[in-house]
Image (spheres, rainbow, N blue to C red):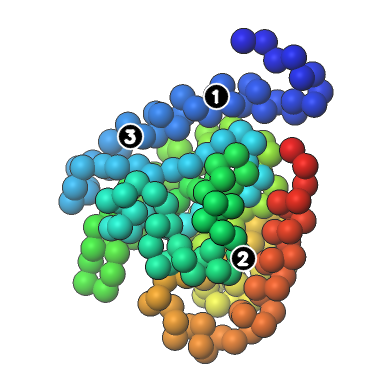
Amino acid sequence: MVCTRGARCGGRCLNSRRIFPLVEEIAGCRLCAADLPHEPRPVVRASASARLLIVGQAPGRRVHETGIPWNDPSGNQLRAWLQMSPEQFYDESRIAIVPTAFCYPGTGKSGDLPPHPACAPQWHPRLIEAMPSVTLTLLIGRYAQAYYLRERCKPTLTETVAGFREHLPHYFPLPHPSPRNRLWLKRNPWFESDVLPALRATLEKVMSHPD
């Protein structure tokens, strides 16, 4: 297959040929199989044309069962924050969904266990390389922020989210939209009054850009 789009392609044709086998490779990954309480079921959505990348922590039980990312109350809340319909949110040509770890890690005493630490270093760099059109990455929760922001991550999630402007235009840190975080949202009303309008304005600029 030879690309006929010339400069208009921007490398996406080549990256499309790279990313589909990569996603299939991830789907068959058993890197952390020995550490999981179930058979691995990696959940990831990616394409070379995606402009927005959503990085969460790891699939929950419901997502593990359905294979659909953010297919739970947390996803409903996230879509409300983004002001996106399910059709917009799951448009794989525009939005990539890449959790910090692709498999449900199981449940601990106080909720889901942390994402397996081997997953992101193994797969994220290759995925990022194959998605050159990504303009903005949403970092949802502490694990995603720690991996991508590194030393720029503040001591607490609250401080990192409050300082979101420091990480633009490439990253936008957010709290996890889990129902468990309702108390955090109540204690931090500035998130709804200040952060969400800025998030939506940023998304409008990113997603309105023609392919």
How far across and down, in percent of the image, does residue 95 sit? 58, 47
Q: Which disc, if any, is residue 29?
A: 3
> Which residue is at 72% across, 70% downward?
198
**Contact check, label 3 and label 1, Cβ < 8 Å:** no
Residue 45 vs 11, above or below: the answer is below
> Which residue is at 23% across, 66% downward?
108
Q: Of 171 and 46, which appears nearest the observer?
A: 46
Q: Of 169 and 203, which appears nearest the observer?
A: 203
- Of tags 2 and 3, the one toward the viewer is 2
Local SS, label 2: loop
Q: Which disc, if any, is residue 18?
A: 1
Q: Is residue 54 visible?
A: no
Residue 151 vs 49, above or below: the answer is below
Local SS, label 1: helix
Task: Left or right? Give the position of 128 relative to 208.
Answer: left
How far across and down, in percent of the image, does residue 60 sit? 33, 58
The quarter holding residue 13 reads top right
